[in-house]
Amino acid sequence: MGKKIKFNRHLKITILGMAFLFGILQPLVAQEGENLWEKAQHQDKEWYASAEAQRIADNVLLYQHDNGGWYKNIDMADELNSAQKDSLRKLKSENVGTTIDNGATHTQLRYLSKVFEATGEEKYKNAFLDGVDYLLKAQYDNGGWPQFYPIKEGYYEHITYNDGAMIGVMELLRNIAKNNKPYTFVDASRRKKAQRAIDKGLEVILATQVKVDGELTIWCAQHDKDDFSPAKARAYELPSLSGKESAGIVEYLLKLENPSSEVKKSIRSAVQWFEAHKVMGEKVVWVKDTTYVEGFDRVVLKDAEGGPLWGRFNDIETGTPIFVGRDGIIKKHLADIEQERRVGYNYIDNYAEELLKKDYPEWEKKY
């Protein structure tokens, strides 16, 4: 049975508390291997008024730094003792490491907006607005966002699409600019700034789309902040065409109202690339393998009905998937890199399947 998140026993029993007791509102229950912070972001609207939702929101406030941003890879739903809370308060002024990587900052802001909408507690609104200001300050003049702000030297300075970083920020700011729920509490000045930010972001998206032999293709996971060229990040993240990140970028572009001819060309060129470079006749499976510490491996098998698949990284000139381990050397097959990377990083998947089957055809009906 999963472990329940406990409630503060010192809270008085209220109508909301009675709702929990009688099962009207349920606390989050962790299943094996499940991240409660992830689960907390996908609850019914009523749940965000609960004591449990507010407990997690208070954690989010503790983890927020004075510059408005957050660190990454933290389970905000973990229960914190007094000593941990005191430590977090002392860390608030240490702003090195605040980031948009791995969903950081824009994910916390989405959560806070839901809790504020449900509770009306001003502290959640204020923290949200501080976070929006952080995102607006972090944007480069050219429209891109670095992975870390304040700037962290190295590949972190690149314009970062990797893991949906920049697109996650732009999705949030677009909803703010459009005054969509639950962001209707945001003031007009910030809405205007959000609109300017996504306009600039669109400019850099169009400018970074990679051309090969004069034809538009897709995007790299990160681009040089100065000349917009495809850029290297970690040893196994070489300059390349990214199937995963590019699918997310196109999905963002599809939602634009009254798209310009340049946007339409960008979308159609990317879709054409995805169509031309899909891998068919193969499937990715997890297999039991006790020779490894984890007890399993990830392999690509031949399958007549398999596909479509696309590489996370693809050779810029040929568009074929490439597989790169921690040695930084390009291999042709997933089996050629170390098992630790095979199971710890997703190199090939059906990244653009939904785009090609459903989302793009629906968009074409309009335009």
Image (spheres, rainbow, N blue to C red):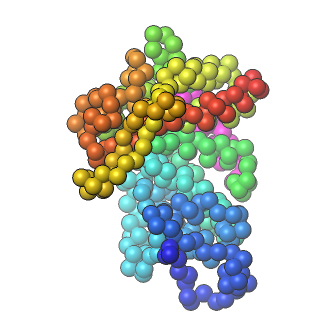
Residue 260 at what x, y percent from top left? 69, 22
Residue at 73%, 84% in the rendered image: 15
Which of these two is toward me, 315 or 287? 287
Residue 109 at what x, y percent from top left? 58, 56
Residue found at the very far front of the displayed protein: 304
Residue at 53%, 25% in the rendered image: 274
Residue found at the very far top of the displayed protein: 213
Instruction: Give the number of marks.
Output: 0
Residue at 50%, 73% in the rendered image: 2
Q: Which residues are the magenta region?
A: 186-205
Q: Relative to 5, does residue 33 appear above or below in the rendering?
A: above
Which of these two is toward me, 349 or 41? 349
In the rendered image, residue 104 lying in the magenta stretch gets the answer no
Residue 119 picture quarter: bottom right
In the rendered image, residue 203 lying in the magenta stretch gets the answer yes
Residue 253 picture quarter: top right
Residue 328 at what x, y percent from top left? 25, 33
Could one spot residue 91 in this view of the protein? yes
Residue 222 at what x, y percent from top left? 42, 33
**Left or right, 134 with reference to 257:** left
**Left or right, 68 with reference to 83:** right
Residue found at the very far right of the displayed protein: 366
Could one spot residue 246 in this view of the protein? no
- Predominant secondary structure, magenta span: helix
Residue at 61%, 33% in the rendered image: 355
Q: Quadrant of the C terminus?
A: top right
Q: Relative to 78, does residue 338 appear above or below in the rendering?
A: above
Which of these two is toward me, 199 or 214? 214
**Left or right, 328 with reference to 108:** left
Q: Relative to 157, does residue 366 appear above or below in the rendering?
A: above
